[in-house]
Amino acid sequence: MSDRPAPPRFSVVICVYTEERWADILAAVDSVRKQSLPPLETLLVVDHNERLLHRLAEEYAGSAAKPGTDARGEVRVLANTGPRGLSAGRNTGIAAARGEFVAFLDDDAVAEHDWLHHFAAGYRDPAVVAVGGRTLPVWASGRRPAWFPEEFDWVVGCTYRGLPPGRVRVRNVLGGNASFRRTAFDAAGGFATGIGRDGDRRPLGCEETELCIRLANAVPGAVLLIDDRAVIHHKVPAARERFAYFRTRVYAEGLSKALVAQSVGAGKGLESERRYTSRVLPAGVLRGVRDALLGRPGGAGRAGAIATGVALAAGGYALGTLRARRGGAPAFSWGPIAPVDGPRRDRDPAAEGAVA
């Protein structure tokens, strides 16, 4: 009998909402099913779209595991049981997850072959409660717009310039390429439904930031990591390559940061942002000015975009803070995560943190 520990069991959650991304959804699921460390299951959580729910259920009807067999590779299609929005969809996936670890992948992204393997490696340390990865943009036009600064790649859901390389400790992971111990949600609750994208026309965010800060507060000594070897490739549609979207998104980020500060306090809520605005962004402006002086394309545009981004984000934060003080901010709800489709399979504590 082998003494080798059992491989960690991952449930991968992909939240979906529109048939316009049908091909992207299938590609995302396919990339998960081809992992070098096979997942226990893939959970497709459909956000209040009956047509998409039924279509996906038909697409993956043959993937369900038979009773008494290994469920690895199974794809389950679920309806979001909470209010419309990404946070409630993720919470639905967490509640249904059977694995010791829950990973999240955007519905318009594909994961590299060893994505889950690198996540699993981080959990060898029992203090680690979350591991994120590196998200690379796939521009619809085929290349980065000359004016678009790498320091603002978070605008399009990607890893931005300023994050340290390698496997490093961080305040928060980025939600579209992240994983958590299932027990983390038992300790801290789920994603807050008063923060992030919820059907509002503004591209709000920061729900994963708020959760990670709350998790660190709830679990003394908790460690959160980013391992840049855990790579996904995230599509950036043409509409998001435009400066109009850039302006809207950075302003919405300011509003979102005000909500985070309201929930967990401005000290922790803005700790990383202060370093980012005082060190990373000034260096980006200088690079842009230098490139402009040297006649390199896009230098002046990048410097201007950084300055505009800072001003708009600050304006959004100021307005969001004012609204909160006047009592106009939405209430937050995260609560405990309860199973939505029966009890999860028994977890084996000895297997947590083990790597194949």
Image: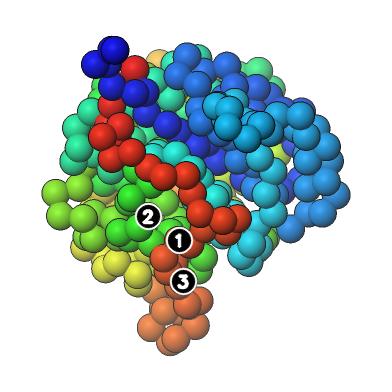
Taking the spot 28% from the left edge, 40% from the top edge, the residue there is: 349
Residue that label 1 marks: 337
Q: Which of label 2 and label 3 is nearer to you?
A: 2
Q: Nearer the viewer, residue 312 or 175?
A: 175
Taking the spot 50% from the left edge, 76% from the top edge, the residue there is: 330
231 vs 221, left or right, is right
Q: Secondary structure at mark 2?
A: helix
Q: Are marks 2 and 3 in contact (CB under 8 Å)?
A: no
Spatial distance from mark 1 to mark 3, Cα to Cα?
11 Å
Q: Nearer the viewer, residue 166 or 92?
A: 92
Colour scheme in use: rainbow
x and y percent of residue 333 in the render?
A: 46, 71
Q: Are marks 1 and 2 in contact (CB under 8 Å)?
A: yes
Give the class, few, some or many, for how many residues have Cα within 10 Å of label 3's Cα (few <14, many ≥20).
some
Above-or-below relation of 311 to 230: below
46 vs 273, left or right, is right
The image quarter in which residue 197 lies? bottom right
x and y percent of residue 65 in the render?
A: 64, 31
User: What's the amino acid at mark 1?
Assistant: Ile
The image quarter in which residue 26 lies? top right
Q: Secondary structure at mark 1?
A: loop
**In this view of the protein, can residue 1 be seen by the observer?**
yes
Q: Quadrant of the N terminus?
A: top left
Spatial distance from mark 1 to mark 2, Cα to Cα?
7 Å
Q: Are marks 1 and 3 in contact (CB under 8 Å)?
A: no
Residue that label 2 marks: 185
User: What's the amino acid at mark 3?
Assistant: Ser
Residue that label 3 marks: 333
